[in-house]
Image (spheres, rainbow, N blue to C red):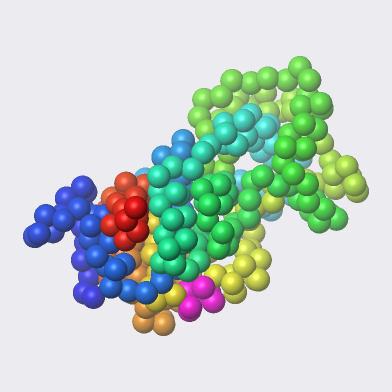
Amino acid sequence: MSLTSIDGQCCNERMQSPGAILAEFMSQTGSVAVLSGAGISTGSGIPDYRDHNGDWKHSQPMQYDEFVRSGKSRQRYWSRSYIGWRRFSAAQPNAGHHALAALEASGKVETLITQNVDRLHQAAGSSQVIDLHGELSRIRCVECDLTRARAEFQADMKDSNPAWHAAVSQIRPDGDVDLAEERAGEFVVPDCDHCGGIVKPDVVMFGEAVPKQRVEQAMAAVERADALLVVGTSLMVFSGFRFARHAQKLRKPIVIVNQGRTRADDMASLKLAADCSDVLPEVHASLVPV
């Protein structure tokens, strides 16, 4: 298929919607591997990282080296995350998540590779999911590698900061929020209750490598599928972009549904500049009629 770029809610010369165009494409191919990003969760109240040009909307997230090196940086991170977790953990899957789960159940989606850490795909019913960047609902000790539920660590932070409170100005995609710096400096961060080590969210932070096994699993999923469907991500980070490059190397079609530009636009057989949470339910309704 030659490159087609559809901008906005409309159509090509036949006045088809982006959802109808994608449904037609998917009806003519076998299974797809899906690579999802923050754009699919915006409809669930979790904001994305980048604007339509692929530039940062906020200051860049904390780097792993800074997190482990600086106690003040950990104070800043965990104080913000402590407040932001209440809203982040309450998020529910939207129509886009549910559509992908239904498409998986029908056999159309082979594997779902997600860059998100919110586990909303699983909450919607998807089972063949690779959490490329981990999950925010767990914490991990940097020293002894012990993992625990985030809810337990959230309770530890509450116990360690009984009188602490701060106003929130903005939530971020990783559950972080913007707080006054002086409030962050008063926050007490609990150590690992097993070894006393540094506790981090069980996610791949910026500057940290994605575990090799996850990358290999995702590469194999791209190899098994007949096409790669990219939804809600600019692919500006290499950890996701590598799968588009892999699909291109294998000469497999790449279809992108994203409201802004992506790093793989010149690789795509089909690019739909639309909200994936609007497009995917239409695809599901067309391919898997009730």
The residue that appears at 62% across and 34% down in the rendered structure is 85
Q: Position of residue 208 (x, y in %)?
A: 64, 59
As displayed, is residue 199 above or below residue 226? Answer: above
Where is residue 249, by image quadrant? bottom left
Q: Does 1 sit left or right of 80 as displayed?
A: left
Q: Main secondary structure of the magenta part?
A: helix
Residue at the extreme top of the image, as rendered: 163
Residue at the extreme right of the image, as rendered: 195
**Residue in the foreground of this view, choosing between 45 and 21:** 21
Visible in this render: residue 115?
A: no
Q: Position of residue 218 (x, y in %)?
A: 55, 70
The residue that appears at 82% across and 36% down in the rendered structure is 190
Where is residue 211, by image quadrant? bottom right
Q: Position of residue 171 (x, y in %)?
A: 52, 33
**Residue in the foreground of this view, choosing between 144 and 74:** 144
Residue at the extreme left of the image, as rendered: 13
Q: Does 199 sit left or right of 222 as displayed?
A: right
The number of callouts visible is: 0
Residue at the extreme front of the image, as rendered: 290
Q: Position of residue 108 (x, y in %)?
A: 41, 66
Visible in this render: residue 142?
A: yes
The residue that appears at 23% across and 75% down in the rendered structure is 1
Q: Does 20 sit left or right of 222 as displayed?
A: left
Q: Does 198 sit left or right of 283 as displayed?
A: right
The residue that appears at 52% across and 25% down in the rendered structure is 169
Where is residue 215, by image quadrant? bottom right
The part of the chain drawn in magenta is: 219-224
Query: In the rendered structure, does residue 236 fall within the stretch colored magenta?
Result: no
